[in-house]
Amino acid sequence: MYARGADGKLALTPSRGWEVEEIVTLQAVKACDELAETARQRAKAGQASTLEYHMHRARMDVALLSQASGIWRWRVRWHLRPRVFARLSPALRQRYAAALGIDVARLDALD
Amino acid sequence: MTVPSFTHQQASHCESGVMSALLRHYGLPISEAMAFGLSSALCFAYLPFVRLSGLPLVSYRMPPRAIVRGLQKPLGFRMCSERFRSPEEGIARLDRLLDDGRLVGLQASVFWLPYMPPDFRFHFNAHNLLVYGRDEASGEYLVSDPVLEDPQRCAPVDMAKARFARGALAPKGLIYYPAGMPSEPDWERAARAAIRKTTRIMLRTPLPLIGVRGIEWLARAVERLPTAADTARAKQYVGHIVRMQEEIGTGGGGFRYMYAAFLEEVAPLCKRPALVGLGAELVDIGDRWREFALATARMIRDRDPLDVRRLASLLRALATRERVFFVALDKAAR
């Protein structure tokens, strides 16, 4: 960050951030993790598809996953249902996996 | 292995850091703060209709690419930028430029860059970095990421993913490199023009969401946050405001410190000693932004009860001070 050096001039000094920054960053990270954890529980209970978990694990939401995969938003939302997701075509699964940056096989896993 | 003699230097903001490193490499040593100030990159914008995972866009600087574009005129050179329809084309073009021994700046998504620490890996598409070569054996890119201490390496697959990530501000494989040589500017003219552009944006943008009035609008939005039913959401919101002025990535205080460094540096060059005093004033304003950040963090951590009124009044005080400051700066640069 920029701070006054010994010569009284503003200069770049190495910084790893301060506590406040860490608090707000962790707040955002925690919010993401919580969404992923809820989705995992829901997927376990059969209330949501594993896609919902993987979406949140990749720190995405429906809008972003839709843009990343090129699949319309309402279709993504439809695929968050477990029964719909179970019957998904290999081509669509491939697109989701590519957008999420994981292997197709891992789409079904709750790791 | 062809590695041109490029030396990595850590900066605090990605775009100004990239441009300062690029110019330094091409023979015009210019500091990061100077690159930031000369391109009039300081700003404030509150755009409630642009949502980042449900939160409004709050920015303390001009939109991405403003620094790359804004330096062309004062320094008298052109930047070539290219975007690509297909990743294959983009990869081939980058590789060709690197084989020619060029230094290439590019835009990428932070999330897909494997060398980034996990806590920073959000879906933010407008990150800038420099590629200065390629390891011929493994094909890995040699990356100089201005926000990191050391140079990095990045596998081609990951780089392609990061460069062609989709979503808001999608990079579309954007690369940029200078055409022609930058030259030392007429400091007096360049600095005055740059400063006056900044004061114009901060004081006289017709849209009330931008500049000093934007801070006031944000204060009002903070004040109206529903806190009775759902404090978690309000905390997310205020935390987001602070996150956008972070230390790593802005030099702290929402870029105010960096701009102060610019004023201090440019004052002797354009023979306007008054700018030094204004720089000191801006450092003080940066400290107030940090105070706001601290107050927010304490409320997020429940060390203080969440009090949106108090946060709003801190923001209003900041708006008042910045208004006085920019009016004075406008006068000093006349």
Image: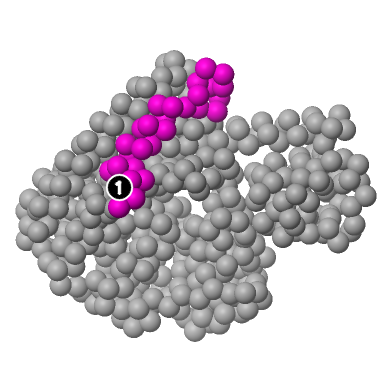
Magenta stretch encompasses residue B253:
no
Where does residue B300 sit, x and y in percent of width and height? 48, 24
In which quadrant will I find the C terminus of chain A?
Answer: top right
Residue B255 lies, with reference to residue A36, above or below; the image says below
For the view shown, which residue lies furthest in the right direction?
Answer: A87
Work out whether residue B318 or residue B144 is closer to the camera in this orientation and state it: B318
Residue positioned 52% across, 17% down in the render = B228
Count of number-bearing discs: 1
Residue with the mark numbered 1:
B211
Name the image quarter holding residue B313: top left
Magenta stretch encompasses residue B222:
yes
Q: Element at badge 1?
A: loop
Residue positioned 19% across, 73% down in the render = B185
Where does residue B298 sit, x and y in percent of width and height? 42, 22
Work out whether residue A3 or residue B150 is closer to the camera in this orientation and state it: A3
Residue B324 lies, with reference to residue B291, above or below; the image says below
Chain designation of label 1: B
Where does residue B2 sit, x and y in percent of width and height? 51, 78
Name the image quarter holding residue B292: top left
Kindly tell me whether residue B54 is visible in this rendering.
yes
Judged left or right of residue B171, residue B207 is left
The crowd level at tag 1 (other Cα within 10 Å; few <14, some 14-19, many 20+) is many
Residue B326 lies, with reference to residue B34, above or below; the image says above
Judged left or right of residue B290, residue B82 is right
**Three-letter amino acid code at disc 1?**
Gly
Where does residue B32 sit, x and y in percent of width and height? 31, 58
Span of residues in magenta: B206-235
Work out whether residue B41 or residue B54 is closer to the camera in this orientation and state it: B54
Residue positioned 57% across, 67% down in the render = B172
Work out whether residue A107 or residue B208 is closer to the camera in this orientation and state it: B208
Residue positioned 46% across, 75% down in the render = B81
